[in-house]
Amino acid sequence: MNFNEINIGTTAELTHKLTGEDIKRFVELTGDDNKLHTDTQYSSKTSFKKPVAHGMLGASFISTVIGTKLPGDGALWFSQSLEFLLPVRVDDVLTIIAEVISKDERTEIIELKTVIVNQNQQTVTQGIAKVKVIEQKEDSIELDANDGKSTRKAALVIGGSGGIGAAVCEALAMKGFDVAIHYHKNSKAAHQVLKKLEKLKQDIKITTCSCDITEEKAVNDMMESVYRKLGGVSILVNCSTTKIIAMKFENLTWTNFESHLNNQIKGTFNLVRAVIPLMQEQKYGKIINIDTQYVDAPEPNLLPYITAKNALRGFSKSLAYDLAPKGIRVNLVSPGMTDTDQIADVPERYKLVTAAKTPLKRLAKPKDVASVVAFLASEECSYITGATISVNGGIFM
């Protein structure tokens, strides 16, 4: 946002649920291991009764609002007053709000009222920020409209901390893509993937990002963050899934279906809605969703999972038709049983039987799936859309 676009009364906000992992990482970064913030037993003997988050941890999200939203790129935040009014604890949901209260045309400095409220609409922190707006010239995206090739190779991998997702991140990185590794809760696994990629490829941008894809605002905030870090998103790979639990029909409730449908359809819808404007701007993009061979060859007691994946296939094929005129391809990769943590609870005997029934006599490996995703993401694959590619060793043909 440039200075002329900013008006008195302009606002921006973001929401963040504070986690124990946030506090742990803040301590690691700053060295502030005050027991009031980190020791349950110690804090129980104080007036707070429970550990409280560092005041500057919450206040640091003011920087996020200023640096990414108001004014965003070019923000030089040089002054901030702060009052810490109430304690903040793990699982508090913080909404950070910035509002322009004055602007100086001569110096291009704006003043912002900054407020942080919790889930009970109580103000926990407030203050005044001063920011100088420094104009920056954005790089343009080069595009050859004749062959649909983008010079910006940036991929967002949803579920990038999981077995298939991690392999996809590695395969795309080795193909020269900048990569954003998405995770929901497992930040440790995501950062392990990040460190591995940094060792493998040092000439690309790699970052992590986190959100619950069923929350529209969280997805929009994540997409904005990834765009800023990578300069664009040309590839969206959706490896997300929920835990698969085998249940007989008579034991099912609608809640079992909702969890899978929310992840596969609502989550995918939110992702697509957020990424399409970026891809339309480039007149180029590829969306690759991971479904399952069980859509074609169902197994017993997996009804909610298979139902949601079947819905994802229909969604993807229809979407491919709608987005083709915009230069955006949509495809699916359909793996057979794949050797990841997702099948850790599957009896070993069942895995062995499945491998024995497979013509290639083994389960799929994550890299088997990832190599197909990497092909679909490549510029060599420009005339495929609406397709489902099976990666199942021939067990279903």
Image (cartoon, helix red, strand yellow):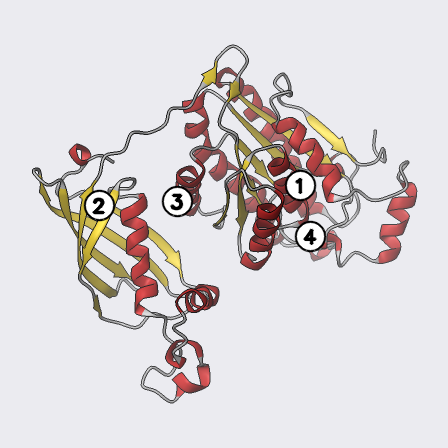
| Residue at x-position 54% and y-position 57% | 187
The residue lying toward the viewer, choosing from 325 and 365, is 365
The residues tagged by marks 4 and 1 sit, at their Cα atoms, a distance apart of 12 Å
Disc 4, disc 1: CB below 8 Å? no
For the residues marked 4 and 2, what is the alpha-carbon distance in whole angstroms? Answer: 42 Å
Amino acid carrying mark 1 in the image: Thr
Q: Nearer the viewer, mark 4 or mark 1?
A: 4
Residue, disc 2: 11
Q: Residue at x 67, y 54 (%)?
A: 252
Q: Categorize mark 2 by other alpha carbons within 10 Å: few (<14), some (14-19), many (20+).
A: some
Q: CA distance from mark 2 to mark 1?
A: 42 Å
**Residue 217 pos. (x, y %):** 39, 45
Q: Is residue 43 left or right of residue 247?
A: left
Label 1 Cα neighbours within 10 Å, binned few <14 / some 14-19 / many ≥20 = some
Q: Reading the chain from its start, which is encountered first: label 4 or label 2? A: 2
User: The disc labelled 3 sits on which kind of residue?
Assistant: Asp
Q: Residue at x 63, y 54 (%)?
A: 253
If the image is split into quadrants, where does the C terminus sit?
top right
Can see residue 119? no
Q: Which residue is mark 4?
A: 244
CA distance for labels 3 and 2: 15 Å
Q: Nearer the viewer, mark 4 or mark 2?
A: 2
> Of circles 2 and 1, which is in front?
2
Which residue is disc 1 drawn over? Answer: 307
Q: What is the residue that sits farthest to the top in this orientation?
A: 146
Give the secondary structure at mark 2: strand
Q: Decide: marks 4, 2 in contact (CB < 8 A)?
A: no
